[in-house]
Image (cartoon, rainbow, N blue to C red):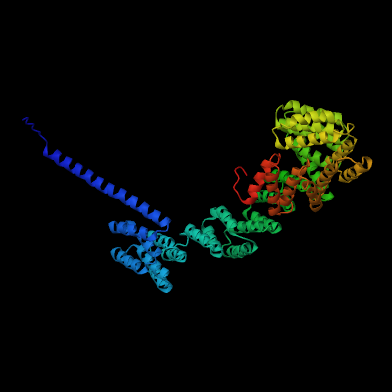
Amino acid sequence: MLNISLNINPRKANKLIKKVGFCLVFLFFGFKTFAQIEDLQLAMQFNRSGELQKANDIYLKLYKQSNEGYFQFYFKSLIGLKKFDEAESVVKKMIRKHPQEYQYTVALGTVYHEKGAQDKADGVYNEIIKNMPAEQTAVNEIAMSFYQAEAIDFAIKAFMQGRKILHNDELYSNELTSLYRYKHDKVNLVNEYINMLQHHPEYASPAKNMLAAMFDGNDDYNMFKAALLKAIQQYPQQTVFADLLTWQYLQQKQFDQALIQAIALSRRLNDGGSSLIELGQTLINNQAYDEAIRAYDYVISKGKEGEYYFRAKMDLLNAKNLKVTTGKYTQADLLGLETGYQELLVELGRNATTAFAMQKLARLQAFKLHKLNDAQKLLEEAISFPNMRQRLLDDCKLDLGDIYLLNNKPWDATLMYSQVEKSSPGTPIAQESQYRNAKLAYYIGDFNWAKGQLDILKAATSQLIANDALNLSLMISDHTAFDSTGNALKMYARADLLIFKEDPDKAVITLDSIDKAFPGNNLSNDILMAKARILIQKNDYPKAIINLKTIADNKADLWADDAVYMLGDIYENQLADKVKAQAYYQQIITDYPGSPWLTEARKRFRLLRGDVVPGS
C-alpha cells in the first residue's frame, strides 16, 4: 500500500474550505433563482392565457419564498381573482413588517378601491400624503407608488404637497406635466407649463410642441390665451409669455394679431428685428404674405445701420415675389415689387452678387408686367458679369431663352438653351434646357425634331422632366398618326405657348377655334386639360375641377393620371380638403401603378394618413 502524506498549511486549508463553501452556497442560490425565474415565466404565461388561478398558485409559492420580491405579482393576482379579503390580509402583514415602505400602504388603499369602498381608499391615501416627510426622495417614492396603483390624482396631490412641505414651487414640473398629459387635463397642463416657464423659459420650445399635440381646436387655444394674458400681467418681466402669445395667435392663424404682438416684443427686447425676420419666414410658410411684408417693412424702417436691414430687404422682395407667384396680388402689388427690385439694385449695384435680384426682376417684367424688352436687356447684362456662380448663370440663360421665345426670337432662345446644355452636361439643369429646346420645337410646329428629343428625355433622372417629356411625346404621336400635317396640333401648340406667356384670354380663344377650324379632331381632352391649366392659373379651382374630373373619368386617356393627381393637389393645397385629396392619391396608387406620379402620390397619401415618412 502506497502511503502519501500531504503537508498542507492550516491557514491555506481554511481559505480553501471557505472558497468551496462559498461556491456551494452560490450554486445553491443560483439554481434556486433560476428555478424562480422559470416559475415566474410560467405564471405569466398562465396569466396571458386567462388561467388566473394557476398563475396565482405559482405567485403564492414565490411569495412564500421571498415576500418582498414577489409581493406585487401575488397582490395583483389576488386583486385579479377578486380575493379582496386575502389581499387585505397579505397587505396588512407587509405593512406590519415594513411600516416605512409606502407601496404597501398604497396597496391597502387599492384593495379598498377595488372592493368599492372608495371613502376608505381615499382615507388611506390622504393619510399617506398628510404624514409625508419633507424629503424629496420620499415624495418621489410615494407619488410613484400612487402612479403604479393608477391613483393618478393622488400622485398629483403627492407632488403638490411635496412642493408645499419642501417650500419649492420649481420641483416636480416634468412629473406633473407628464401626469396632466396622461389625464388629458389641458387646463392644469397649461398652468403647470406657465409655472415651469417662469423659472425655466428655455423649455418654451418643448412646451409649444406638447401643447400643439394636445390641443384640439380654438377652445383650447382660447383657454391658453386667457392663461397667458394673466401670466403676462402677473410676471411682466418674463418675455417668454409674450412669445407664447405670438405663437398662440399663429396656431389660430390670427396672423395680424401675431404680428402686432411680435413687434411689441421686438421693441421690448430691442433685438434689432431678429425675431421679426424669423416670424416673417413662418408667415411666408403659411402664405400670410401681407403680414410677412409688414414684418420686413418694420425691420427696414429701423434704418440701414441695423444688423438685419439688408436681410429684411431681400426677404421683403421674396415675400412680395411669392405673393405674385401664388396669384394673390393686384396690379399695384406688381408695380410695387418692380420698384422694390429696382431700388435694391440702385442701392447695391448691378453685379454678380445681385444678379439673382436681376433675374427675379426680369421674370416679373416678362411674365407679369409683359415688359419683354426691359426683361431681355436686364438678363443680357446679368449673363455678362464675370465670376458668376455657374448655376445662377445657367438659370439666367434659361430665363433669357424663355424671354427670347416670348419676344418671338426662337433662334436666340434655342441658342441660350443649347449653351446651358453644353455648360453642364449630364446634370438636371442640362436636361431641363434640352426639354425647353424640345418644347420650343413643339411650339413652332417642328414635331418630328421635338419628338426625337422628348424620347431621349423620357429616361431623364428628373421625374418631372421625364413625365412631361413622356406626355408631350405621346400627344405628338397620337395627333400626327392620322394627320401628317398636324394642323390641329399646331393650333393647339400656339394656344399652349399663349398659356406659357400667361396670356390666358387669347389662349382660350385659340383653343375654342380648333374645333371650328378642324372639325372631327381628337384633341378634346387635351383642350380640356389646357383649359384646366388656365383656370388654375386664374385660381378658379371649382371650374378647373370640373374639367379635370371629366378627363379622369376616362381612365384610358393620356391625361387621366395627371388629372387625378392634379385633383389631389388642388384638394390638398388649395381647398384644404384632406379627405378628398387622400382619395385621389389613393386612386393613383390603385388605378395607375405605372404612372410617373406614383411615388409622389404614395408619399402624399401616407402623409395625409398620418404616417411618418422619412425625409418629409
On screen, residue 389 versus residue 130, left or right, reads right
Q: Position of residue 555 (x, y in %)?
A: 76, 44
Q: Nearer the viewer, residue 348 or 399?
A: 399
Find residue 584 and report its horizontal and vertical position in percent: 71, 49
Q: How many numbered marks does the figure carry? A: 0
* Percent coordinates x, y for residue 82 in the rendering: 39, 67
Q: Looking at the picture, does residue 35 appear above or below residue 199?
A: above
- Picture quadrant of residue 305: top right
Q: Name the image quarter holding residue 168.
A: bottom left
- In this image, 309 relative to 174: left or right? right
Taking depth in this image into account, of 424 and 349 the one nearest to the observer is 424
Left or right relative to 227: residue 12 = left
Any part of residue 84 in sight:
yes
Residue situated furthest top in the rendering: 422
Please determine whether, in this image, residue 399 is positioned above or below residue 70.
Answer: above
Q: Position of residue 208 (x, y in %)?
A: 58, 55
| Quadrant containing the C terminus in the rendered view | top right
The quarter of the image holding the N terminus is: top left
Q: Quadrant of residue 251?
A: bottom right
Residue at horizontal 63 percent and vertical 56 percent from the top: 247
The one nearer the camera, 142 or 505, is 505
Left or right: 17 with respect to 605? left
The answer to whether residue 305 of the structure is visible from this angle is: no
Residue plotted at (78% across, 27% down): 419
Q: Is residue 419 above or below residue 207?
A: above
Instruction: Work out whether residue 392 or residue 311 is closer to the camera in this orientation and state it.
Output: 392
